[in-house]
Image: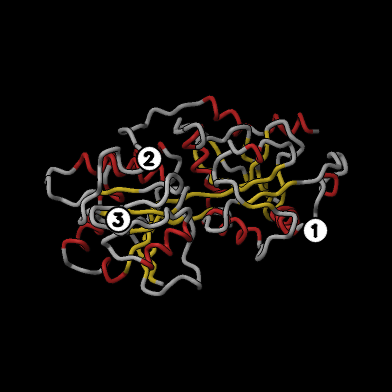
Amino acid sequence: MRKTAAKLLTVAALATSVATVFSGTAVADPAAGVTPAAQDIVGVGSDTTQVLLNQFSADYNASLTDPNAPRLYSWDATGSSPITTKNGATPIARPNGSGAGIKALVANTSATVDFARSSRAPQPTDAHGLDFVALAKDAVTWSAKSGGDAPAQLTADQLAAIYNCTTTTWNQIDPSLPANTIKPFLPQADSGTRAFFLSAIGVATPGSCVASGPEENEGTDPLLNDPDVVFPYSVAHFLGQTVGGHTTATDAPGNLTLRNIVVNGTVLTPVTNNVIDTNFANSQFGRVVYNVVRDAEWTATDPHGQALQAIFGSSGWICTSPAAANDLASYGFLATPACGVATLT
């Protein structure tokens, strides 16, 4: 049963495929020796979109012809801490995850942070006066170790039972599966992928059997190298790693492969022809990812507001530039017609 299931996971074969849609070289954090200027547009937050924003930074800045125009920079979710985000800013603890990035945006001014990367939609607990500006389409599925005990697919209800800890062994799902204990993991508490995945499967509070802590969208953590692990994973980030070839020693899927989800009797496959499957993206497991800004700045007509709109707005570089479209594809994301549309909290 296990070997048969593994053969069904054609997504695993993506790890050997590399796309050719690169448009420049992205770096983690601003490049060594570069301190963003006070007027530059600087962001923090989500792990899921950090590599995409790093690439946007490289390509957007290269497109500018005015040497005095505000540049775009993005700080990774992990790394040394604290960080001095731009010239003259007070150092802050490095925000790891959508929630932490949004909190940093609220707690500081544009002298420190201009936007937060977010892989989740607005929540009732978010501060008022923020604009969630749509960036792209992603999806989240579950992953498990190749060759392990997990089947090729689970229903949304089965995933809920696993994360509620009412289903604790594989043979409770299928008697032909081993009686081994399932080991559900979640990313750290500020992760937008964590929040989205739990909402998608209808789990308000994970059960006591669920472990938290590994950085999202990577399988290099030794805790995840286990035949009984279940771990949520951004489909776009996985495609960026495997098809786009955007990996590092720590930002890679390792032995994890993406698995299918059954919704209302229909098997939804996360990837078709090396892109996010349309049916999967349109299901409850599809999501929009955002850049979050302060509404007072987003709607301002001063140079700072103009710079935000020039980058993130519906007529801005991200939503209209062919280079940005290539970047989205290279990093596994789908374009959204809502690009640049803001949702106010």
Q: Can you identify the residue that label 2 sits on?
A: 28
Tell us which disc is closer to us: 3 or 2. Answer: 2
Q: In which quarter of the image is residue 55?
A: top left
Residue sitting at 27 percent across and 66 percent down?
A: 298
Q: Which label's residue is closer to the chain start, 3 or 2?
A: 2
Residue pointed to by mark 1: 166
How many residues crowd mark 2 within 10 Å: few (<14), some (14–19), many (20+)? some
- Rendered location of residue 15, percent (x, y): 55, 29
Residue 147 visible at all: yes
- What's the amino acid at mark 1? Thr
Left or right: where 270 falls relative to 295:
right
- As drawn, the residue found furthest toward the top would be 16
Of callouts 3 and 1, the N-terminal one: 1
| Closer to the eye: label 2 or 1 | 2
Eyeballing the image, is 300 above or below 242?
below
The Cα atoms of the two marked residues, 3 and 1, are separated by: 43 Å
Q: Name the residue under label 3.
A: 312
Q: Which amino acid does label 2 sit on?
A: Ala
* Callout 1 secondary element: loop
Instruction: Tell me what residue is drawn at x 44 percent, y 33 percent.
Output: 246
Residue at 40%, 48% in the rendered image: 335
Image spot of residue 297 (x, y percent): 26, 67
